[in-house]
């Protein structure tokens, strides 16, 4: 039909430009190894940093919650969907993060849609890092506030922008904690100092820092010792926590305001009982032990050191996100395809997700990987790297 022609055209364009995304299907649980096309493959692509996605302690908690609470919340939180489990999770998050209060929402994406439009009106100004996550960009797009986009991690420009806007009363600085494509950290101590100097609010989206940075994985504010100085911490339960869901942590008034007015809280149903119970279990595991976090970092350091010794460029990551820089998109795709033939699942990332000429394989390390897994992957990177003339 003619009215659909534009979609056919758009899909054809994506194919022509080599931007068509072929999505692989996982035929079993998420773990260090996953089954794809009927065969086990070593998984280097997931955000399952701590191996919690199929941890029996989490699955047991989820099953018990289904037996006690059923599968669905039945309503949005504000009408009939708040179960005692949701409150238990919020107490656990606030305790874990060291904040006065916390709010659980359905996803990390929704945290940004909840907070940014609620806090920022047309007379306000927000400051946002140019490489912030798409969900922050979408949150910003839902406001009529003035926007100042600062170059990546550039606090000098941020200072100039704050100075130029000093007469605007309400200011919000927003940054990712860990930037997901390069694994570098926001300069949060400098941002917090500027915020204090200019009386601006600071919001950090800690999606890739949760369970990874700080004591027992408490996140980037803990990593930098900034407790009480970051106004709004957002995060996800879908990465290191291995489940699904989002949270916002901060002052009690902020959380109360979100409860009253945030649109994803008011207009989208609550997280499901099994998800919430599994999230609580994940937090309790981390409170009791930092073993999974230590294992994650050991694995990441081992893997990066070995790849660098082979001559690979691993960028400037400060976290277990390990970019293996390959330059042209074609090289990255060929590399990923060859790895897959060798049963290593590691997706290529190219423009427009990263700049042109900065295509890469992004290897995501996990506490679930054994030393043998890593040695196997390193051997295959060496093999393919030599085949393709990268090293
Ligand atoms: C992954 C990610 C999200 C989205 O989290 P979901 O829980 O999957 O919706 C939001 N913000 C950042 C910075 C992320 O990396």
Image: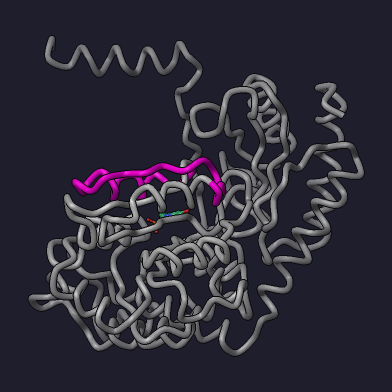
Residue at image location 50% in from the left, 78% down from the top: 282
Dividing the picture into quadrants, the one containing residue 344 is: top right
The question of residue 130 being in magenta is answered with no
State which quarter of the image contains the C terminus.
Answer: top right
The quadrant of the picture showing ligand 1 is bottom left
Horizontal relation, residue 116 to residue 323: left or right: left
Above or below 96: residue 38: above
**Position in image of residue 252 (x %, y %):** 29, 84
* Residue furthest right in the image: 309
Number of disc labels: 0
In the depicted view, which residue is nearer to us: 2 or 318? 318
Front in this rendered view, residue 227 or 278: 227
Q: What colouring method underlies this structural image?
A: one colour
Depicted 351 relative to depicted 45: above or below: above
Q: Residue at x 48, y 52 (%)?
A: 159
Residue 197 place in picture, x, y as percent: 45, 67
Spot occupied by residue 209 in the image (x, y as percentages of width and height): 55, 64
Q: Nearer the viewer, residue 328 or 379?
A: 328
The relative height of residue 42 versus residue 98 in the rendered view (above or below) is above
Residue at coordinates 12% horizontally, 75% vertically from top-left? 78
Q: Tell me: 82 left or right of 38.
A: left
Instruction: Residue 342 in the image: state x and y as whole percent.
Output: 75, 36
Stretch in magenta = 131-156
Which quadrant is the N terminus positioned in? top left
Residue 142 among those drawn in magenta: yes
Q: Quadrant of residue 360?
A: top right
Q: Is residue 311 above or below residue 332?
A: below
Q: Residue at x 13, y 74 (%)?
A: 260
Q: Is residue 185 left or right of residue 86?
A: right
């Amino acid at each position: 039909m003619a009215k659909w022609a534009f979609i056919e055209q758009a899909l054809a364009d994506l194919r022509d430009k080599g931007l068509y995304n072929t999505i692989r299907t996982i035929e079993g649980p998420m773990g260090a190894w996953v089954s794809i096309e009927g065969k086990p493959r070593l998984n280097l692509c997931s955000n399952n940093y701590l191996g919690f996605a199929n941890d029996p302690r989490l699955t047991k908690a989820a099953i018990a919650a289904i037996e006690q609470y059923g599968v669905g919340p039945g309503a949005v939180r504000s009408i009939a969907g708040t179960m005692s489990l949701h409150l238990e999770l919020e107490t656990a998050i606030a305790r874990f993060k060291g904040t006065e209060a916390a709010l659980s929402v359905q996803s990390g994406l929704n945290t940004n849609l909840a907070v940014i439009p609620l806090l920022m009106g047309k007379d306000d100004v927000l400051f946002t890092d140019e490489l912030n996550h798409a969900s922050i960009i979408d949150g910003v797009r839902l406001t009529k506030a003035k926007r100042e986009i600062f170059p990546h991690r550039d606090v000098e420009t941020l200072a100039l922008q704050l100075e130029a806007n000093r007469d605007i009363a309400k200011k919000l600085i927003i940054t990712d904690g860990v930037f997901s494509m390069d694994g570098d950290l926001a300069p949060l101590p400098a941002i917090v100092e500027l915020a204090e100097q200019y009386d601006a609010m600071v919001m950090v989206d800690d999606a890739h820092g949760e369970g990874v940075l700080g004591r027992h994985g408490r996140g980037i504010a803990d990593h930098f010792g900034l407790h009480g100085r970051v106004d709004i911490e957002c995060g996800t339960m879908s990465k290191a926590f291995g489940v699904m869901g989002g949270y916002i942590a901060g002052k009690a008034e902020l959380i109360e305001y979100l409860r009253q007015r945030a649109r994803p809280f008011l207009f989208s149903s609550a997280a499901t009982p099994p998800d919430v119970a599994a999230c609580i279990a994940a937090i309790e595991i981390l409170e009791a032990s930092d073993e999974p976090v230590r294992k994650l970092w050991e694995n990441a350091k081992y893997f990066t050191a070995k790849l660098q010794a082979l001559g690979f460029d691993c960028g400037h990551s400060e976290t277990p996100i390990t970019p293996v820089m390959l330059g042209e998109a074609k090289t990255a795709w060929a590399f990923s395809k060859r790895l897959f033939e060798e049963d290593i699942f590691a997706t290529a990332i190219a423009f427009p997700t990263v700049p042109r000429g900065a295509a890469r394989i992004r290897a995501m390390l996990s506490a679930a990987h054994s030393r043998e897994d890593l040695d196997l992957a390193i051997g295959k990177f060496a093999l393919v790297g030599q085949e393709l003339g990268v090293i």
